[in-house]
Image (tube, grey):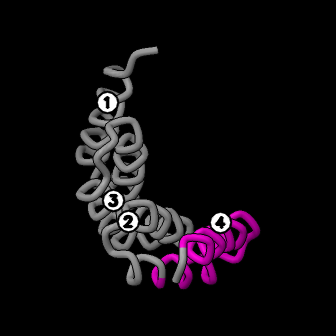
Amino acid sequence: MNDRHREALSVLGYFFLLNGKTGKALVLFRALRDLFPGEPLFAGSLGYACLALGDYRGALAASEAFLERETDPAVRTAGCLLRGKALWGLGDAAGAREALNDGLAREGGRSG
């Protein structure tokens, strides 16, 4: 699969997600994650699809995969937010606060 195909499938996944076809987005993002396991974007996208479906365990696993792979501190903040929302959904308020505080600390360290 070339980069254009990969990008088109990713855009289609977001289209599904934004238009209430969350199950279809989930299938697409799972496939992209499996095809490109080292790409953090697809782990994060999968996490948001899981979150939208109320699959907090799936969202948590995807957020952890995203945070393991993403190296840009500014982008990792989104992973912290996803992790916090998943933990909150699982009833772990303390873990959710810790994840959100971690994300906020990353944001606070940014300049400009």
Viewer-side residue, 90 vs 31: 31
Name the residue that disc number 2 marks: 39
Under mark 1, the amino acid is Arg
Identity of the residue furthest to the front in this view? 2
Q: Residues within 10 Å of mark 3 (few under 14, many from 20)?
A: many
Q: Residue at x 62, y 71 (%)?
A: 4
The quadrant where residue 13 appears? bottom right
Mark 1 / mark 2, whichever is N-terminal: 2
Q: Is residue 63 magenta?
A: no
Mark 3 / mark 2, whichever is N-terminal: 2
Rendered image: mark on residue 96: none
Q: Residues within 10 Å of mark 4 (few under 14, many from 20)?
A: many
Under mark 2, the amino acid is Glu
Name the residue that disc number 3 marks: 66
Q: Residues within 10 Å of mark 1 (few under 14, many from 20)?
A: some
Mark 4 / mark 2, whichever is N-terminal: 4
**Could you say where residue 110 lies in the image, as x and y percent from the top left?**
37, 22
Mark 1 / mark 4, whichever is N-terminal: 4
| Residues at marks 3 and 4, CA–CA distance in whole angstroms | 17 Å
Q: Is residue 14 magenta?
A: yes
Q: Residue at x 33, y 64 (%)?
A: 60
Name the residue that disc number 4 marks: 14
Q: Residues within 10 Å of mark 2 (few under 14, many from 20)?
A: some
Span highlighted in magenta in the image: 3-31
Name the residue that disc number 1 marks: 106
Mark whose residue sits in front, 4 or 2: 2
